[in-house]
Image: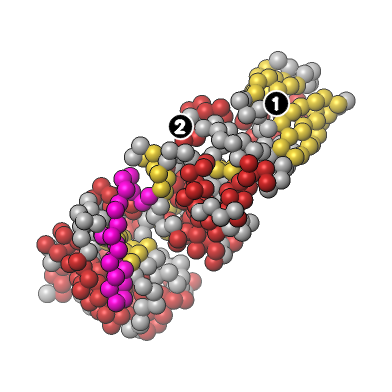
Amino acid sequence: MAKRLALALLAASLGLHGQTLRVKAAGQPKPVALEIEDYVAAAVAGEAGGFKSMEALKAMAVAARTFARANLNRHRVEDYDLCETTHCQDLRLNAVAARHRAAAEATAGEILWYNGRPARVFYTGHCGGHTESAGAVWPHSAAPYLRGVADDFCLSAGPQNWSSAIPLDALARLFQLPAIESIAVARRTATNRAAAVSLNGRTFSAESFYIAIGRKFGWDRLRSTRFFIETRGSDAHFTGSGRGHGVGLCQAGAEQRGRAGHDYRRILAAYFPGTRIGIAARDIPWVLARTSRADIRATSEAPAAPLAAAVERAISRAENLAGRRIAVRPEIRVYPGVDVFRDATGEPGFIAAATRGRVVHLQSAERLIAGGRLDSVLTHEVVHILIGGRANLPRWFEEGLVLELEAPGAVKAAPLAAPTEAALRRPASEARLRAAYANAQAAVAMLIGRHGRANVLSWADSGLPAGLK
């Protein structure tokens, strides 16, 4: 009987707490697992930590989330998704402030789309008054929405003029030449940036020249590719303006646009013309319905009416199971089809629901109602809202605790299996996900047997003791 109950519960609550990225962090022997919105907040802290404008921060949050969605396979051969350096995005996990989290939450799930696919986005520190076309820097990255655009707002932040000098013999060693006999900008782009640099008649792309010098001598020597070169005695003197490669969103301009009253959608439209902001490849005509304790966003294809009573029941039941009152107003999003659900969440089609923060994403309420699973799935997801978000919990603990709260003793206590955490964070199949759920609940049941229910439930707020992580 207990086994049948456990299997029924797993079938009813096949969902995930949220999309997870595996990130290689400095000083960590293994990749760190980050929920997508935690990743976005850390990227905003790293890439735009000094922004004062909330709308500019929100624009950066959408751009950072878009980058993550479009580049998930960048480090696949190294067995993780993204790194924390500027090769991917500069993450500052320890510098995330309330405003960075607020920007991620306000734009949760939104990315930039172009022709039904996540756009490839770039950003630069200061474009010097005109962004650069991506094709002029990286020919394989040319796209209609990555063409150069004039940016007077960037100039209102100041011209960012700079100069520096590098000994010619140091440049010769860097580029493996016996000596520097001549150095000049060989070709310029339409925006007057260097496109190619000639050393002794040998041509290098300006981007590779800029990166080589930055990595060797520091990024303050050549702050952008908008530079001029002059030989003075034994040194090469560089003068220029701006910061970075100039492609995509200009961070200085975005900040000034936000301060001038532009909202984040208008800011992004200025730098990525022709893209569309949304959580799915096609527009979702959301219709908002409110119950006494929750918001429901649905469409004419997947109406909210059958959900209202079920959502209220789920909140009450979840509060009884967890022994605490819900402190936020949940939002339930009901998608009109599996393709839209996949676009919006990045989850596989066999997942019934995914919860991120206070938002529950439902793949198909109609199917859940037909299968008699709607109440159990909603309850499961609301329990996640009740116990989640207070500590950096392993997925096995949170999923297992939710299941054990729903059906205490439904599975036999057992140790945590090594593959369970990975299977929960990146499920390869429905069967593996079910097995991982069962083992997670068994592992939490073992903890409760050893430490007591009250102590284990308290760890949802304080985090797992060091020896159990």
Span shown in magenta: 278-298
Residue 168 in view:
no
Look at the numbered disc 1 and give the secondary structure of its residue.
loop
Q: Quadrant of the C terminus?
A: bottom left
Q: Residue at x 65, y 20 (%)?
A: 187
- From this viewpoint, which residue is outermost toward the top? 201
Q: Relative to 272, is 207 above or below? A: above
Determine if the magenta segment contains residue 291: yes
Q: Quadrant of residue 299?
A: bottom left
Q: Residue at x 68, y 32 (%)?
A: 226
Residue 466 in view:
yes
Q: Position of residue 14 (x, y in %)?
A: 24, 62
Q: Position of residue 312 (x, y in %)?
A: 25, 76
Q: Amino acid at mark 1?
A: Phe
Along the line of sight, the residue nearer the viewer: 221 or 419: 221
Lateral position of residue 39 relative to residue 366, left or right:
right
Q: In terms of sequence position, does the residue under pointer 2 or pointer 1 come before the other?
A: 2
- From this viewpoint, which residue is outermost toward the right? 233
Q: Amino acid at mark 2?
A: Pro
Q: Relative to 270, is 302 above or below? A: below
In the drawing, what numbered circle is on residue 144? 2
Along the line of sight, the residue nearer the viewer: 423 or 392: 392
Q: Relative to 186, is 423 above or below? A: below
Look at the numbered disc 2 and give the secondary structure of its residue.
helix
In the drawing, what numbered circle is on residue 301? none
Along the line of sight, the residue nearer the viewer: 238 or 449: 238
**Real-space Cα distance between discs 2 and 1?**
34 Å
In the drawing, what numbered circle is on residue 175? 1
Q: Are marks 2 and 1 in contact (CB under 8 Å)?
A: no
Lateral position of residue 304 relative to residue 167, left or right:
left
Q: Residue at x 42, y 45 (%)?
A: 112
Q: Position of residue 289 (x, y in %)?
A: 28, 67
